[in-house]
Image (cartoon, helix red, strand yellow):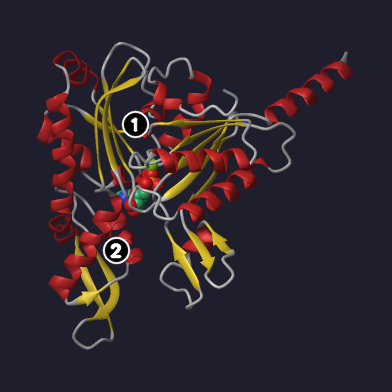
Amino acid sequence: MRVALGIFSKIKGWFSLSSDIGIDLGTASILVHVKDKGIVLCEPSVVAIDKDSGKLYAVGSEAQKMLGRTPGNIVAIRPLREGVISDYSSTERMLKYFIRKVTKNRIFKPRIMICVPSGVTEVEERAVVDAGTQAGGRQVYLIEEPIAAAIGAGLDISRACGCMVVDIGGGTSDVAVISLGGIVVSDSIKVAGDRFDDAIVKYIRKKHNAVIGDRTAESVKINIGSVYKMDEEKSMEVRGRSLLSGLPMSITITSEEIREALDEVAVQIVDTVHSVLERTPPELVGDIAENGVALTGGGAMISGLDKLLMEKTGIRVYLADDPLSCVAKGTGAALDNLHVLRDKSSCVYDQQE
Ligand code: ADP
Ligand code: MG
């Protein structure tokens, strides 16, 4: 009996080796979710390429360290930065690299669901699916980002009841109203976390006559950035280069200053939410007012965004649990719920069709 059970659990183990994979191919980071295991990989969407040989030099966090620090023959890029695939072959190679990394030693080919940024064209989607297939996907599906974000945030999208999700990534912000497994109204803008960083760089250049790098700007945003008055204001010292002397200098900046810098970008996000609500059928607006608006994506973690949106829309807004992983979790979970996804375009490519 014990032997039979042992064999059974071994066989079960093999099957789980072939389990479903969900990939969030984000503009800032790529996350991989494996069924029964959770998030197994989270790396920046960055590749470094040797221009002379065309070879992939580094991928993910290794490549990120090289951004802005490469010698002439090596380029480090974020191929999805603006929410479109600016560099086709790098994206494909990056995706294949990560899929192979999590699927090596697998006996059976997995089913793969991939979530791509909403600005990606059909041709680019096709390239993503091909990369998934070449990397060993038995079936490769695509899912729209707001649907994945909503599932990952724990919303029940299958009901005839409107829910709203605002996903703010690095390059794009997606606002969508979902009901019966499909998107009813949506909008996407190329204004998100990266724009906050750019606004900080510009502000410090103008106000303090100093240049700081993107990574420094991001850490300022994460440490003291806010878009709504904070209970306790903060300050931080940063190092940059003086525009006047060209030499290194350190500046102390306050959270009030950063809020002023971020205001314009925050307004654009608020306006997009507003315009989607304006276009939403009244019944669904009623549902949203009752259920609240879920915020997902790393960019949504900026302090005070929930309060700002709540003040401007009069609707309850809340940050989902673990906002950075919502899309990846939802993408993985969607493979169990293919029947719920009403819109055919939610899963366009089935390689076995
Ligand atoms: P994408 O889905 O486009 O890959 P992510 O959901 O990974 O993007 O979010 C990346 C963005 O989130 C970046 O702009 C990053 O600076 C920002 N971010 C991450 N953590 C925080 C935080 N604690 N506060 C504010 N912004 C954050
Ligand atoms: Mg995302």
Rendering quarter of residue 268: top left
Residue drawn at x 66%, y 40% as measured from the top left: 103
Q: Is mark 2 within 8 Å of ligand 1?
A: no
Residue drawn at x 52%, y 70% as measured from the top left: 51
Quarter the C terminus occupies: top right
Q: Which sits in the foreground, 84 or 110? A: 84
What label sits on residue 165 in the rendered view?
none
- How many callouts does the rendering have? 2
Residue under label 2, please give it: 217
Where residue 177 appears, as percent x and y from the top left, is 26, 25
Quarter the N terminus occupies: top right
Where residue 164 appears, as percent x and y from the top left, is 26, 26
Would you place residue 102 above or below residue 142 in this image? below
Circle 1 Cα neighbour tier, 10 Å, few/some/many (<14 / 14–19 / ≥20): many
Give the mark toward the camera: 1 or 2.
1
Q: Which sits in the foreground, 135 or 305? A: 135
Residue drawn at x 18%, y 34% as measured from the top left: 273
Taking the image as shown, residue 190 lies to the left or right of residue 315, namely right
Rendering quarter of residue 352: top right
Residue drawn at x 36%, y 64% as measured from the top left: 215
Determine the residue located farthest toward the bottom in the rendered image.
Answer: 245
Q: Answer yes or no: do the residues labelled 1 and 2 have beta carbons within 8 Å?
A: no
SS under mark 2: helix
The Cα–Cα distance between marks 1 and 2, rounded to whole angstroms, is: 27 Å
Circle 2 Cα neighbour tier, 10 Å, few/some/many (<14 / 14–19 / ≥20): many
At label 2, the amino acid type is: Ala
Where residue 241 appears, as percent x and y from the top left, is 27, 80
Determine the residue located farthest toward the top in the rendered image.
Answer: 160
Is residue 308 in view?
Answer: no
Residue under label 1, please give it: 146
At label 1, the amino acid type is: Pro
SS under mark 1: helix
